Image (cartoon, grey):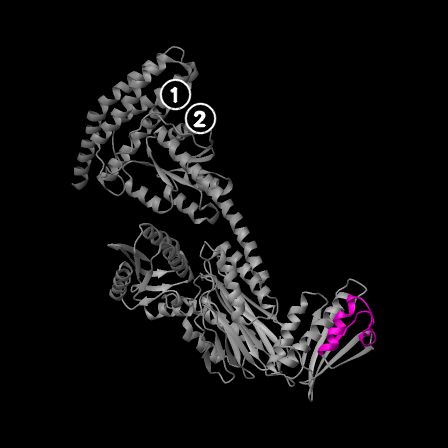
Amino acid sequence: MKIAIDRQEGTAVVTVSGRLSSAEADLFQQQLMAGLDDKPTAVVVDFSELKFITSAGLRVLILAAKRARSDGYYIYLCGMIATIREVFEVSGLLRIFIVHPSLEAGLAAVKQDVGESVV
Amino acid sequence: MVAQVLDLRLAAIAERVRAVVGPATEPISAAAATLAAAASATAVADEISQIGKAARLLVEMVETCLPEMEEDGSIETTCSRLRHDLRTPLVALKGYGELVLEIATDEGLDAVSAALGPLLEGVADVMVAIERALPAMSHAMAVEEGSEGDGPGLASYPSGRVLVADDSQANRDVLVKYLSREGHDVVAVADGLAAVEAVFEQPFDVVLLDMIMPGMNGDEVLKAIKAEPRLRLLPVIMISALDALDSIVRCIEAGAEDYLPKPFNRVLLRARIGACLEKKRLREVELSYLRAVEKELTIAREVQRSILPKAFPAHRSLAGHGLMDPAREIGGDFYDFFALDDDRVGIAVGDVSGKGVPAAVYMAMVRTQLRATALFGLSPAECLYRLNDHLSADNAEGMFVSLFYGIIDCGTGVFTYANGGHNWPILLRADGSVEWVKGTDDLLVGVIHGSAYHNAALELAAGDSLFVYTDGVVEAIDSAEAEFGKDRLAAVLADKAGLAPEMLCGGVLTAVRTFEGGLPHSDDLTCVAVRFLGGQADASRFEMRIANAIAEISRLISAVQAFLLRREVAAETAYPLAMAVEEAVANVIRHGYADSEPHAITVRLACDGGQWIAEVVDDGVSFDPTTRVSDNGGFHIGLLLIKTMVDEIEYIREADCNRLRMIKSSPRSRMPPP
């Protein structure tokens, strides 16, 4: 697993690649939470390079979503391969996360949402 | 001709040694003489005489230096041998010199101390002179010497049993003296074979092995030690000349812990032996800790297993089997099945996020709460909803469970289920066709307070099976990191259609483990198979046995209501009938027994023409309600109520049992709506 967090103005763009299972989840949690500590206005997680996710990875995303909600912003997931999307579908997480087809679409959604909320 | 040229080169080497090293030995001889003459030196007389002997040997070796060609005909090997030989007296001089210096300093022998400075300096000079006269190919290790003497921050190390193997008597003596003084228990042997014998026969904490010994070299002894499983962790330090870098590297690769350059530096020797012993001690602490953790995990695993139901509830139209194969690390899978009443069986499979003891504890909590909720007879969606509210109320760790819970109605074959983020189960039809039991895409349980859960239903025909499983099945991977996957699972099951539930579970387990090809699995593997054998011959009857406990009443009544609902009995009949049963049973439980032993109460419902008949049978004290209605006291208010609810009551005492029949002719008697 590789994680990169890139800041584009107020938006934290998190790229996760490889496998995200219980062995890697702690590191993912540490890094993602550190990213949230910087008080972003939105978090975009790019999954296009992610090959595999288990419940341990889902748990980190849920924690992050709760944190984001209490801090007043959203987490945008984007670019999932079909098998990962199915995990989200089966686990009912599509009810709490909106998944965008690509990083560009995710960033555009952020622009729209954050823009609207400012106005 | 060639031999003559070589001889000339050997003679040139000898000449260089005499010219370069010779003068450097003079201060040593002088210092040795001063030492021998020093007053009050009796405490160290033995050591000083050894110093004198070594000094004379050194001078003699330099003067009579006559190198011989080594067997491999290499000048480099010859020089290496010569360097090795010349260092032998130096090792003794340095070793005894430092030892005497320490004793002399401790005991205030100033004259002795004064003479030792020039002696040790002389040794260092001769070392340099030898390097100049016989330059080694490899100088990579020449940085080792440096921290001479007992510098500041002298560390203290644990003591232990040390084996020293060195063919040089002088080296052995020095090491034994050094190490004994450090508080170690030292055994010294003179060759490799004796070293091997010693380590196989006696316990040691660390072994010091000279690289070059007659018969069996140090590296061969090292290999013998590392090849023996029970000695594999015994640390071995190689003793070697600085220029033997290649062989040192080979030994480190072969499992040696460290190396020690000759001549010995006391600080280095103490540090390396100390580090080995410290490491060994820490390893032992760690091992005992690991054993304790392992033991706790075994207990946790046992707890996890003991929570699983022992057997599928016996039922004439249902067979089932559950299986959990835990991963090495304890995980959070569980399954459960329980009879809700005589017609309905609940089946649950869950997988808790994460691993280890937290997952196991959470799993136990989920299973207990699910049972507590389910036994009230609530629908699957309602159970998940309540469970989710409990679990998400206080969940800082963000734990959750994917949970599938369904109820099979054995009378009708209807399977009602709710799916909180769990893998889609499989419906395996009797003919071998496979359908996915798709969820309502409801959220994992425990994540968000107030999440909605939905019921879904499907109909089972005789011979159909349900197969519910966890990630451990579909996410198992083979050596090429390919997943077992849903398609493979479906294919395995399709192949086994019509087999008993044990065979389905066992078959899937075997298929998954074969697929993994012996690789260790990181997740628990759980599966439950339930096979519907066909509806009951007479689905219009209801029978349930409960214990004589007030807590049993809600289970009974929810089963009665569910039965009447399935039979599409109108509420105006169903409600009073259920209420009459509840009153009758409550009366029996409260007042029917003269002892405090457990008793069974049987409740039956049957439709006979236009009438519904509810029957309550108990083995309590003889009591005929039909004759007791007008008695005073609260005791019989229940009886009055029953009389209001139903049209007729009949009582028989037979075979030491009370048999109360309550007859409701629908839909004549009117009841206020519930």
Q: Position of residue A113 (x, y in %)?
A: 29, 62
Callouts 2 and 1 close, C-beta under 8 Å: yes
- Per the rendered image, the range of residues in magenta is B616-645
Chain containing the residue with disc 2:
B
Same chain assignment for discs 2 and 1: yes
Amino acid at circle 2: Arg
Q: Position of residue B115 (x, y in %)?
A: 32, 15
Q: Nearer the viewer, residue B522 or B340?
A: B340
B250 falls in the magenta region: no
| Residue of label 1 | B102
Q: Is residue B165 visible?
A: no
- Which residue is located at x 47 percent, y 44 percent? B286
Write down the quadrant of residue B625 in the picture: bottom right
> Most extreme residue toward the top, as rendered?
B39
Q: Is residue B150 left or right of residue B465?
A: left
Q: Is residue B504 above or below residue B10?
A: below
Q: Is residue B285 visible?
A: yes
> Most extreme residue toward the bottom, as rendered?
B609
Amino acid at circle 1: Glu
Q: Position of residue B531 (x, y in %)?
A: 56, 78
Q: Is residue B530 above or below residue B122?
A: below
Q: Where the C terminus of chain B falls, by quadrant? A: bottom right
| Residue of label 2 | B181
Q: Nearer the viewer, residue B117 or B310?
A: B310
Q: Where the N terminus of chain B falls, by quadrant? A: top left
